[in-house]
Image: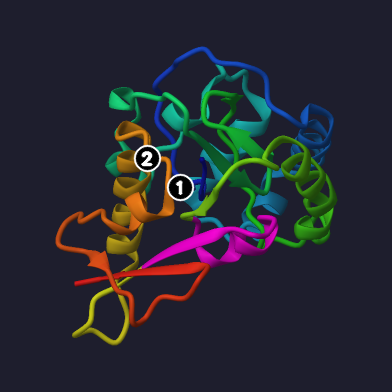
Amino acid sequence: MIIFISPSKTFTNSIKPGKSILFKDKTERLFNEIKSFKKDEIKIKFDLSDKLVDEVYDYYHKEQTLSQAIIRYGGILYKSLDAETLNFKDNQIFILSAMYGLVPHDAEIKKYRIDFTHRMLGNLYHYWKKDLTHYMKLEFKNEILIDLTSKEFEDLIIKPKYRIDFKVLNQKTTPTVLLKQMRGLFAREIVNKNIQTLDQIKSLVINDFKFNQELSTEFEFIFTK
């Protein structure tokens, strides 16, 4: 089973050695293009505060120690995932990223700032789509694909895939923070319980979220509370 999750804009300083990224040449091309921007260009292009612009500028101009992606990302999803306590067996986590394309959880990455909404380097969906599709069709052809990403990433994943989403029934929209927490917790359960079937996923109950047959479809599983 392959679990797809989103990256985060925040990072930790934790270091854990890992393996090489999948698309080194394409990533280096993007990294070097951003490195060529002056500091005031980075501030404008990324719409950064004065406090953040120095930090982001340093991502591209100061030496960084590489670390496993699942350790390096530091957002809400990753805090729920609690990577140091994961017990990987048959299932694997991959992270979709505008800088790296597709990142195995244990591949080494640097801190960076770029996402698919940024167009200063062109359309990054187009930049990555062909390579990701080819890789997934080749490497994941016998796997169940589980989509725990946010909406902006879902079109990058080949079909058939099974998307998991969460709804609080008495609220018009589910808070973004809660969505990120639940994605991390679900990914964690799938890995640590070494879940192998869709029925096992449907049977999960986490923080009172249960599978809702009525709201779900064949390829979209809705968990509600």
Q: Which residue is mark 2?
A: 195
Q: Residue at x 76, y 35 (%)?
A: 27
The stretch of residues the image draws in magenta is 149-165
Q: Residue at x 75, y 42 (%)?
A: 34
Are discs 2 and 1 less than 8 Å apart at CB? no
Residue beneath the point at 62% across and 18% down: 63
Three-letter amino acid code at the position of disc 2:
Ile
Find out whether residue 22 is within the magenta segment: no
Query: Observer-nearest residue: 120 or 145?
Result: 145
Across and down, in percent, residue 142 comes to: 65, 40
Q: Position of residue 193 (x, y in %)?
A: 30, 35
**Where does label 1 land, which residue?**
51
* Percent position of residue 60, x then y: 67, 32
What secondary structure is marked by label 2?
loop
The amino acid marked with disc number 1 is: Lys
Location of residue 15 (image quadrant)? top left
Q: Is residue 152 left or right of residue 122?
A: left
Q: Quadrant of residue 107?
A: top right
Is residue 76 visible in the rendered image? The answer is no
Disc 2 versus disc 1: distance between alpha carbons?
A: 43 Å
